[in-house]
Each structure stands twice: as structure tokens, then as C-alpha cells.
Image (tube, rainbow, N blue to C red):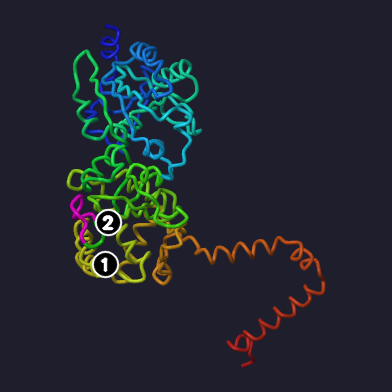
Amino acid sequence: MLQHQARELAPAGTTPVARFTPTDLAFTWDAERRTFAHQYDRDLQLLVVWSRAREHEDAVRRLLLEDFRVVAEVEVRWSPDEVATNFERLYGQGLYGTTDKPDEVGGGPFLVFVLEDPAPRYGYRQNVSGYVELTNLHVADAKAAARGLTGGYRIHSSNNVREFFHDATLLLGEARVRALLEHEGPEPHRETVAEDVVGSRGWRDLAELFGVLRLASQYVVLRNFEDLPGTLEDDREIDLLTRDRTDLAAIANARPLDPGGDGVQHGCTVGGDQVVLDVREVGDGYLDSRWQDVLLRHREWHAGLVAVPRADDHLYSLLYHAKVQKPAVKPAYAPRLAALARRVGLPPAVADRITEDDVAASVLDGFLSAHGYGVPRTSDPGVHRNDAFVARLRLTTVAPTPLAAARTELWRSARSSRVADLAARSSLLRRAYRRARAGARAGARALTGVGRAS
């Protein structure tokens, strides 16, 4: 009865939670209730009792029933040889199979509670990683109480509805999560699942991969997405932008392809074959970070499943890629750019010549400067910069190349060094500098005729 009354007092959301995507989540301040609230009509959360805490699961269940409707109780059993990697993928870590999480919380069967908060309250809290984020306060209190019962970190929970979909999708799979959204009735759905984190043996097809990414990751496919989520025939590389490269790679079960493990290229298995994910992240200098944020927030859905840039962002990011990041425009890009230019309303005379240097520079310069975007210095040494084209940008702020930046830094260091200070104090060097400067000026006058007698 108390739960039903609380639901009636809760603010009514306008968006069905079945339409959730991570990028769309937004919070507003509810002054009357003095809490932050999101736009979804239900607030779902997840709490996990790891295997070393299972002896306390009845007490944890009673604790949860005080404030939540328990939608489901699912026992999950992982393969012994996948336990470490499963933990790494859930927590968004590099996939090296070296985590000590199994020793801390156990690697045996664990219990997943899927919860609905009938009257959620959100406020700022600091998580275990130190980040301050909007957190469901009821879940935070329940997790703290459950950890008090079990000791240590043997209890895991989502902090907000975005984390619910991230964790639940990885642990239970997209299809099972969507089925649980439809579960009704007074009794929880109960099930035992002998499956590793979704995609652990590779992905059936790209549709399965993108179905999981839709619920669990903030991302956008930057270009060449027209045939997705179909099969990749010639080019088996997908260019992605995301908030967090390591987390997206963990979700996709994709491992770094460079020897050091710090590059952008990651390989995952789809339909038995390797697909390369070229993963860029906000702040890496591949594009202006403000533009990267806009690309993610303005994304649209291709084929109802694949996140892609809005038409205008698609045009300008592809033009930037073709002219700034490549020594020459790929033949396939020319008609695509012309079609995009027409789609966003550029004049035909401009659209038809969009890949010519003078037209491309004028269009790109105007777009970047109008939005306050610059040409940053990328952290990826494998990204080409067409300096001859970049020099045509007159209105846009351009970060120096690494070589130019290094020269500037060396010059600044030299100017502030002890040797430079002593040189500046030397009257002999000052006289020599004045004589050299006077000689240079005299030579310039002789060449230009300035000061010459008539």
C-alpha cells in the first residue's frame, strides 16, 4: 500500500522507459519535491549480491522490499574461464583477464535483483571512482545498508537509470531486459541464467552488437554507415565516437589491436569474423571536444538501430575528415559530400564544388568559426593533418602541430633558462645585438630604396 501511494505522488514522466537510450537521459530540478527527476515514466535499478555474499541474500531482499518493487530475481552463473573478463567488461576496464575482483567478491553464482523505485529521489553523490554524479538516493542508501550486512564490496548496484541499462544489458542481454520491462504482477520474475556477459563468445551479427550498444553506450558511427547493421563486405572497419573508449570496447568485447594497447583500433568478432572498431573519444583531439559532444547529443538513428550524426554534423565532420585528416579526398566521398551539402540546403554551386580546396575551406572555416570549434591537436599520431589545406582557414583557431608546439616550448624554456638570463645581463652581447640589428635594417633599406637620395 505504501508503495502505491508513493507512486501516485511521484512526478509523471513523459517518455516510456522502453525508449531509453543513454544519450537522451536528462534531469530537471523538481522544486516542489526538492529532487532531481528524469524524463522517463519509470525508474529501474539493479543490485547484485556477489557469490561471497549469498548467505545474506534473504536479509538483503527484506531490505530492498522496504523501498522497491522487486521486478526480477535472476541467478547468473558464469563460465570459470570467463569470470575475470566478465568483471572487466561490466566495470568498463581493459580486457586483460587480470582483475582481482573474483578474489574480492567471488566468482561463483550471484543473484541479480531488478528493482523499480516507485518514488525516486535523485541527488549528487560521489561514487567509488571519485566522480560526482546524479544518483538515486534510495539505491545509494540500500547499497550502503547491504554492504554493512555483507562486508566490503560484495554488493554492486547501479547508481542511476543509465547505469541500470548498462549493467543489466551486459549481465542479462538486451532481449531479457526488454522482456523484464513488460513484466507485471505482484511476484518477481525468477530465472537461472548460465551465460557469460553478452557477446563473450562473439556477436551473432552487427544487429546484436548495435542492439546492446543502443542501451548501454553513448556513441555515434561517424561515417560509412549506410549499409549498417548489415554485413561489411570490403571495409570491415567501423569509425566510432564515444564518451569513453575503454568502456565501449569493454561492452563490445573488443580488444586493442596495437601492441601497447593504447591505440584507437579494437577488434571484435562478429559472425565468426573480425571487425575493427576505430574508437575515438571526447577530448582526444580527433575533433574539437565541443563538437564531439554535440555529435553525440544530436545523433539520429539509422535503420532504427545505429546511432549516426545528424545530417549537418555528418556533412561537416565528413568534410573535415576528407580535407583536414586526409592528404586527398577519397573518390567515394565526393558524391556523398555533394549530396549531403544539397540535403542541408547549401546552394547547388557550392554543393557541386564542395571538395575543391577554396570552396571546402570557405565552407568549413565558416562552420567551425561560427560554432566556436577549432582544429585541435590530436593525441593519435596516426591521424594525418593536411597543413596546406589547414593554412586556408582564416577564421578558425588552429592548434599548432606537435613539432611547432615543441619548438615553442623549447624557445620558452630557453628564454627562462639561467644561460638566457646571464646573456640578457651581458653588456657585450647587448652591444653585439644592437649592431646586428642596425646592420639588418641598413640592408633592408638598401634593397627597398627606403632612405635613398633622389
Q: Is disc 2 placed on a helix, strand or loop?
A: loop
**Residue drawn at (61%, 93%) of the image:** 454
Q: Work out which residue is located at the far top of the displayed protein and give it.
A: 1
**Residue drawn at (21%, 64%) of the image:** 338
**Is residue 387 shown above or below 8?**
below
Q: In which quarter of the image is the N terminus?
A: top left
Q: Which of 156 and 82 is in front in this view?
A: 82
Q: What residue type is labelled 2?
A: Arg
Mark 2 vs mark 1, foreground winner is 2
Name which quarter of the figure residue 133 lies in: top left
Q: What residue type is labelled 1?
A: Ile
Residue wearing tag 2: 223
Residue 40 lies, in percent from the top left, at 27, 27
320 relative position to 305: left or right: right
Q: Classify 10 Å Cα crowding around label 2: few (below 14), some (14-19), many (20 and above).
A: some
Name which quarter of the figure residue 187 lies in: top left
Q: Nearer the viewer, residue 42 or 98?
A: 98
Label 2, label 1: how far apart the Cα atoms are: 17 Å
The stretch drawn in magenta includes residue 50: no
Q: Is disc 1 placed on a helix, strand or loop?
A: loop
Residue wearing tag 1: 354
- Specify which label sits upstream in the sequence, 2 or 1: 2
Name which quarter of the figure residue 435 lies in: bottom right
Q: How many marks?
A: 2
Return the mark for residue 299: none
Residue 22 lies, in percent from the top left, at 31, 37
Residue 115 lies, in percent from the top left, at 31, 21
Q: Nearer the viewer, residue 240 or 323?
A: 240
**Is residue 107 shown above or below 382?**
above
Q: Work out which residue is located at the far right of the displayed protein and give it.
A: 427
Q: Give the range drawn in magenta.
A: 225-233
